[in-house]
Image (tube, rainbow, N blue to C red):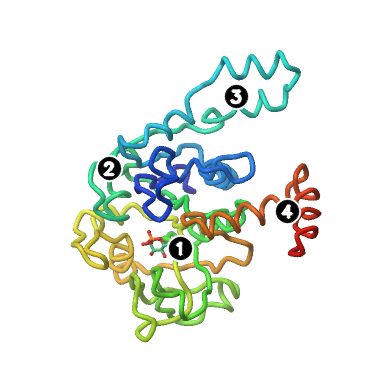
Amino acid sequence: MPARIAVVPAAGLGTRFLPATKAVPKELLPIVDRPAIQYTIDEAVGAGIDHIVIVTNEAKPGIEGYFKPSQMVVDKMRAAGRDELAARMERIGRDVQVSFVYQDKPLGLGHAVGCARALVGQATFAVLLPDELLPDANLLSAMSELNQKTGKSVLGLARVTMDQVSAYGCVVPGVDVTAELGASVVQLAGVVEKPKREEAPSDIVLMGRYILEPSIWDDIASLKPSANGELQLTDALQEQIHREGMHGIVVDSDHYDTGNPFGWLTTVIDIALKDPIVGKQLSEWLRSRGSG
Ligand code: G1P
């Protein structure tokens, strides 16, 4: 069965974005007219997911609030003749089942994903980190297809410059599988979380998309603190790679990091420039500032 359920870890405190994230979760910061997390939902739905489990914490009630029905606003938009917006508002949280689980201690990404175990059960599942924004579902769909073909977990990968690798989980590439699976597929011999630049095994990193086979749950349950003293999902992947093998697909489209002010700003500008409503106006404005 292809992955139909996705875990979206959203319990982080957004410390790279304080004080903006003191009252507004970073997942709700707007990218043009949509909160960032809606892009994650749209991407997942586009890849065939019909149930999203959001891992949050009780200090971020705004995330649940976003998915609650808002009949009053819908009625007001309809009365104002804004039917398209009303329909969009009505779809939020209805085109897909959304569930919430709570991470009560910030013990790391491995722990956050582990909080969803009871809800996900023994199914192949996706994990999407909402800080990483992809404008379409192409990568996740290709990952799901490869998972169907191999029966093994598949990771979303990106190439970065060597001075960026230590911010990510980094891949130890295995044998060349181009002839068998295509040029963008990498067989994984291992993964290491946030290596020092001089110790990094490659320039290929984990970019926040995972299709995981359920045997990962026991690896997650056995995690010990490692990089940054946290329970790292990457360490569970390393166990699964050694036991069962795994592949990754290197993304070939735009992808954005919205989790810090500069990344968010450039994401907003880039996506706004492609927007049918504000794109032209923004590009003219940038040109008038001598920067377009
Ligand atoms: C997490 C993962 C890391 C991955 C990264 C992608 O790190 O632990 O393996 O490369 O997301 O954004 P974080 O950004 O939470 O430090």
Q: Earlier in the sequence, mark 4 or mark 1?
A: 1
Q: Which residue was labeled with disc 2?
A: 103
Which amino acid lies under the numbered mark 3 shown in the image of this protein? Glu
If the image is split into quadrants, where does the C terminus sit? bottom right
Q: Secondary structure at mark 3?
A: helix
**Could you give the CA–CA distance between mark 4 and mark 1, rounded to whole angstroms?**
29 Å
Query: What residue is at 33 percent from the left and 52 percent from the top?
Result: 214
Residue 27 image offset from top left, x and y in percent: 47, 44
Examine the image and state in which quarter residue 211 appears. Answer: bottom left
Please tell me the numbered disc located at residue 273: 4
**Could you give the CA–CA distance between mark 4 and mark 3, rounded to whole angstroms?**
27 Å
1 or 3: mark nearer the eye: 3
Q: Earlier in the sequence, mark 3 or mark 2?
A: 3
Q: Which residue was labeled with disc 1?
A: 155
Q: Which residue was labeled with disc 3?
A: 90
Q: Secondary structure at mark 2?
A: loop
Q: Secondary structure at mark 4?
A: helix
Which amino acid lies under the numbered mark 4 shown in the image of this protein? Leu
Q: Secondary structure at mark 1?
A: strand
